[in-house]
Amino acid sequence: WGTEDKLRVKLEWEHRNFFGQARYFSIKARYSAIVEALETELRQPYFFHRRQFLENRFGYRKDKLVSFTNEQLFNDILVTRMLSKRLSISAGHGVEYNDPQKVEVDTPFEESQRGQKYFISAGKLSIQYDARDNILDPQKGFFALLGADVASGIIASEIGYLRLVTEARHYIRLPYNLILAERLLAGTIQATESTDEIPIFKRFFAGGSTSVRGYGFQK
């Protein structure tokens, strides 16, 4: 149960040796007041190199948010290379088919999005450094991520943009079995090529229990 999404239900099936070679496969379903999703994930280790793996995510997602409702079909494929024990780099490509509905923001551009569908094709690149002592239950260390998505008509996208996201997390062990956890998340997106405005489903929103607390969800 959550303040924004009310009742949350999640079902997941996974296989950690799918057809051998330590291949991972999972099917996940989620439901709440603000999201409905069905997703599959396939991870192939030792992809042409012992320190490299391939990930493919395919699925359907429906976001029912304060400002809009959007239905999305997506497929992301990424190749990740471990440069060291803590440092990795990922590169890949993602495609999305978006159908924004019930856009509640009353501006001329948002009005024009009602009934319009978007096909997005974007290249993806990210680098991360993970110095946490435990990925599932960190008690000390830090994590940093810098990612970029580039959508362009050159790769058949109907809109163009550059999206940058950075995230940092820091954990400090305190007396009495307490852990101080800090998190910083920031992002920006800029329209490129012939795109004048970023569609509402690609914009950043602050507020809520997982963002800027003290402000209402998507306020």
Image (tube, rainbow, N blue to C red):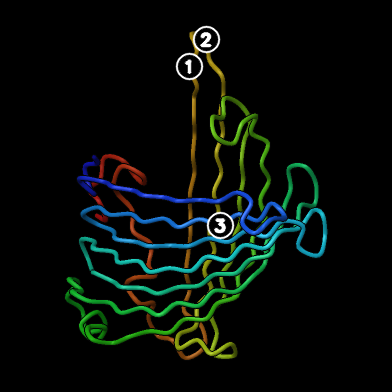
Q: Nearer the viewer, residue 134 or 25?
A: 25
**Amino acid type, callout 3:** Phe
What whole-number distance in Å separates the C-alpha atoms at marks 1 and 3? 35 Å
Crowding around mark 3 (Cα neighbors within 10 Å: few <14, some 14 to 19, many 20+) is: many
**Amino acid type, callout 2:** Pro
Crowding around mark 2 (Cα neighbors within 10 Å: few <14, some 14 to 19, many 20+) is: few
Q: Return the disc, 3 or 2, that comes first in the chain's sequence.
A: 3
Q: Residue furthest top?
A: 176
Q: Which residue is mark 3?
A: 25
Q: Residue furthest right?
A: 49
Q: Residue 145: x, y in percent?
A: 61, 51
For residue 61, side relative to residue 18 (left or right): left
Q: Say which mark, if any, is on residue 175.
A: 2
Q: Residue 42: x, y in percent?
A: 58, 61
**Amino acid type, callout 1:** Leu
Q: Which residue is mark 1?
A: 178
Q: Say which mark, if any, is on residue 114.
A: none
Q: Nearer the viewer, residue 35 or 182?
A: 35
Looking at the image, residue 170 lies above or below residue 88: above
Q: Quadrant of residue 52?
A: bottom right
Where does the N terminus fall, quadrant-wise?
top left
Where does the C terminus fall, quadrant-wise?
bottom left
Q: Quadrant of residue 142?
A: top right
